[in-house]
Amino acid sequence: MIHTVLADDEVLARQKLRQLLRDEPDVDIVGEGASASETIELVRAAGPDLLFLDIRMPGMDGFDVVGALSSITDKPLPRIVFTTAYDQYAVRAFEIHAVDYLLKPFTTERLRTAVQRVRDQFSAPEQTTGQSNGKSKHESPYTTRIVFKSRGRILFLPVADIRWIGAEENYVRICTEKETHLLRETMAHLEVRLDPQVFLRVHRSSIVNLQYVKEVRTEPTGDFSVLLVNGQKVPMSRSYRSRVSELLIRG
Amino acid sequence: MRLWSYRIPIPLLLEAWGVQYFLWGVVSWLLWQLWGAQIQRAGIACILTRVLPLSILTSILVEMIWVLCFPNLPLNRPHMAYWHRLWFELSEELFDNVVIFWCAFGLFRGMGYYQSFREKEDAANQLEAQLAHAQISALRMQLNPHFLFNTMNSISSLMRTDVEGADMMLEQLGSLLRITLERGDAPLIRLRDEMEFIEMYLAMQDKRFVGRVQQSIKVDASLYDVLVPTMILQPIVENAYAHGLSKIDKGGLLAIEAHEDRGHLIFSVLNTGIGLVPDSSKRTGGQGVGLANIKGRLQLHYGDDHSFQISEIGRNTVQVTLSIPLQMSQSEEEETARFVAQ
């Protein structure tokens, strides 16, 4: 069970969360706070696993709540999902290791993704956030999440969700299961940040997530391509062929 | 100054002139510092009652100092007392000095006129810029609300039959508004950002015209950083829906394309539907307003270096073509993404 506290000064906002979270059988709402001080009390008393936190609330804001909580309790902080109408706090939220950042109004789908990310963090303890005690044993130097804006939303995208990345001049296109996002980035910049055990540059203009690679194909034209599990084809350079095959066999 | 000699040593002549003009320089500078503004503004009465006496006084003063500097002038004359020499010089030089004074006076006035002319010109330029800016924002404001109301109506309709769909559309509307607000008053944005907006807009339209319209977008990646007027495409696409695609119940096609041609960015928006209605100008709230807006904005941004055409290129197929000068964005904007390793 994920014990959850909702914090929002607006009744309707809390009601929305409560109703939508009813569909998540493993989410148990243990309390609702309508102000910063109420929320701090609640979290201290109930010690929940997850906190849905509005940023603008009367008195103190969401970040003050997190600050106050981390100074008064030695228990691990709950995972935090921010829910707010303001997009300018995303980077700050990211810096305090929030799990997700929901911009109001958000859809059921978006909330579901956020809850899933919380579950993923619980089930993969070696990738816990910086709030847990100390550092994990083998801290990876590679990016685990990317934060960016796309189509008016803020995404805290775990890199594990990326299927492949394609270059488009000064931009890169990041493809996930359902969507693609254009970022003003370079392939080289991204490549060094991604774990080479998982992400492989197969072409001047493509990086694939080996987790989603089904097979390597030779096209009738003699060119090579990587076939992803969802049927997508990504072009591949000849020189990368052996490397890909080797990694695929090992995996 | 008269030196009263035909055989006067050149260095002495230069020295005498130098001292005289130096004195005038100092005096002019002092006058400028003390009464520059008054001199520039002085009317006829003030000139006659104050500047005229001042000119004579100043001329005498300069001569007094000059005579003090050259005790053995005039040459080839028996030695004279100071007052004698002053009188002697003044009788010859006063008029010249007064002329110098009035030349300086004329210069002051001229500078004053020039300055105020420049100030007026600057103010006029600034005003023009503000006006253009106001026009652009006013034009843009006309575009947004009616799109907003249509969408709200769609949501209102959806929420009775398809709660998830309504939810989705609200989120999309929120995102569109957020992006619009974020861009604020920037008159030009990157093509990529404009296209992102269009993609979001098309996604919303797709919800409203379920399966009726096939959308296609082709933009060369090398054009992503070209600057375009903010929200220039949305009204064109909106028109394509309002006057073409919404009139047919299936098999609609909307194709948006951007490419480069001889230093210009060419947009083309093609849609099927019912073709151009001959008497389109008489329809109320139709193409007239939205497209006039676009033309106005293109004119403001690019003068005559642009083109905008609507034509029927085939049976029931309308194409809008727009051409603007190719201008690359130079600004390296703030980081778009953040990476974290945990």
Image (spheres, rainbow, N blue to C red):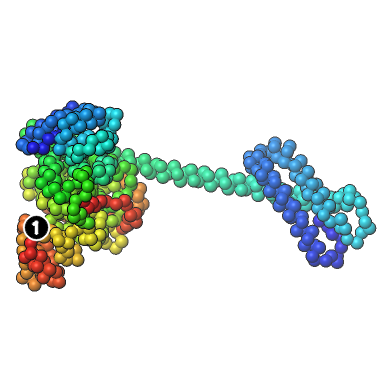
Residue A111 on image: x %, y %: 13, 39
- Circle 1 residue: A212
Decide which of A223, B308 is in the foreground and name it: A223
Front-most of B292 and B282?
B292
The percent coordinates of residue A11 (x first, y second) are: 18, 27
- The image shows residue A37, relative to residue B228, as above or below, that is above
Residue A184 in picture, x, y percent from top left: 25, 55
Say whether residue A186 is left or right of residue B161. right
- Evaluate whether residue B53 shows in this view: yes
Chain at tag 1: A
Give the residue drawn at x 6%, y 56%.
A230
Residue at point 83% right, 53% down?
B67
Q: Nearer the viewer, residue A196 or A161?
A: A196
Q: Residue at x 79, y 65 (%)?
A: B11
> To which quarter of the image does residue A219 belong?
bottom left
Q: Amino acid at mark 1?
A: Tyr
Q: Residue B148: name its quadrant.
A: top left
Secondary structure at badge 1 equals helix
Residue B139: image x %, image y %? 30, 41
Residue drawn at x 71%, y 52% as measured from the top left: B25
